[in-house]
Amino acid sequence: MSKWLNSANNPDRLLKLYPGIDRFIMSGTEGEVTVEEARSGKLTLKAKDKTGRCFYLHSPADPLTEAERFISRQGLQQGQKVALVGLGFGYHLAEILRQVGSDGQVIVFEPNASVLKAFLASLPEGIDLLLAPQVKLVTGSDLGKFIRELRLVLEDLSISNGRLVIHSPSLRLWPGEFESVKQVLQEWKVKVDTSEARKDLMGENFKKNLLCITKDLPVNHIFGRLSGIPLVIVSAGPSLDKNIGDLKKLKGKAVIMAVGTALGALQKAGIKPDLIIITDPSPVVMKQLKGIFLDAPLIYLPTVFPGVVAVHQGIRLVAFQEGWEQSERYAREQGLETVQTGGSVATTALDIAIRTGAEPIIFVGQDLAYSDNKTHASNTMYGRQKIKPVNILFTAGNQEEKVPTSVSWLIFLKWIERRIAEEKGRLFVNATAGGALIRGTITMPLAEVIEKYIDSRVNVVELLQNLFGEGKDNK
């Protein structure tokens, strides 16, 4: 029996909080980790990975100072929510708790029973650390539950300004069945690091776009002005290839709002969208626009790459996003409403579409999945991109039981479902010919949508001409 069960700290509260944790701990492999005293006098953990190579989970010299330096680089704030991957001996957990304070929250993911066993057996304060009211522990006793908890936490971090902290040495001891989870974490970490790196770029873009921002229409100009008008959000998922022909039948009868990635496919099919939305701050966005004549009204964020604004030939509408301090401040000063972005151009498009009052809102090409083993539709910049099998997860499909997807798409999917759930009584239709099931929508082929919900008497061309003519006069 592990020493922690007889500890003076009394483990009853931990057993009550985490039923079955004693059985999980006792499943730890003897000899997988060994406790040593570091030169500083603190304890450290030595381990063997799957190749038989020895390594330390913490510094053999001074694990406490190492943890303080590691966490100081994470940029944590008081009250923040943190997902900590890898418990080790808890030095970095203690430092995280110090930095986020009593209003913060830390979810600890530790699937290795041997590490948890050594932690609780060797450190009398270990139980108290895990019993802190801000801490929640997720063990590896149930792989399915572990994955579900991790997915929910990552989704929450994406909308709550939370942080993911990965203790990399701990990953080397994760059981083999958790390999796919490690890959999800690595993908998410790349996404977060890329987002952090883009902050400076977004600030520069805002400055360069400022002259246009002051002259262009705010997207608020169309809020509430499309009440009862059907609106189609066209994304660039693989299934767009299947129903792009039916999409042509909607021209003039519904507002067609296209994301930048879909423009090549639409142009090839002879479809000119009524609205274009582009939000990417990176110069790579210009590849989407190669060979495209941009004169349909453009919705853009003030942090978009300035080249997009420069090449556009028509009316522009600027949407000031939540979560970007410069954008929020400018919107406040002008008395404008901000929009939720949700992390992608399609989620931004949905929030704007909802605010216009349009109904029904129809999704086309919103696969959020690797439909037909592809990432995007043909005639797009990513049309030939191949699936990377290591990143694949599965979710419920709107035509199939399960479809392959990625952690990023799952997060966008949950955001879309939450945003739809906020709109009681509104009609949302998923006319994507494949891909992920979007809860809160009616799933229906686009041809049936046209027959059931599209009124041929609606003159979208005239409506938009009047709307933008009025806005242009009032600029």
Image (cartoon, rainbow, N blue to C red):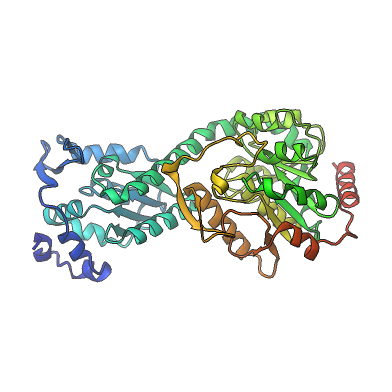
Q: Where is residue 299 drawn, in percent x and y?
A: 73, 42
Q: Is residue 234 above or below residue 270?
A: below
State the residue at coordinates (29%, 36%): 69
Q: Is residue 339 visible?
A: yes
Q: Is residue 92 left or right of residue 185?
A: left
Q: Is residue 130 left or right of residue 44?
A: right
Q: Is residue 311 left or right of residue 88?
A: right
Q: Where is residue 409 drawn, in percent x and y?
A: 53, 49
State the residue at coordinates (30%, 38%): 70
Q: Is residue 332 visible?
A: no
Q: Where is residue 252 drawn, in percent x and y?
A: 86, 51
In which quarter of the view is residue 431 placed? bottom right
Q: How many marks?
A: 0
State the residue at coordinates (26%, 47%): 174
In which quarter of the view is residue 383 placed? top right
Quick one: quadrant of the C terminus?
top right
State the residue at coordinates (10%, 36%): 39
Nearest the viewer among 183 and 422 is 183
Q: Where is residue 258 drawn, in percent x and y?
A: 72, 45
Q: Is residue 470 left or right of residue 96?
A: right
In which quarter of the view is residue 288 placed? top right
Quick one: quadrant of the N terminus?
bottom left
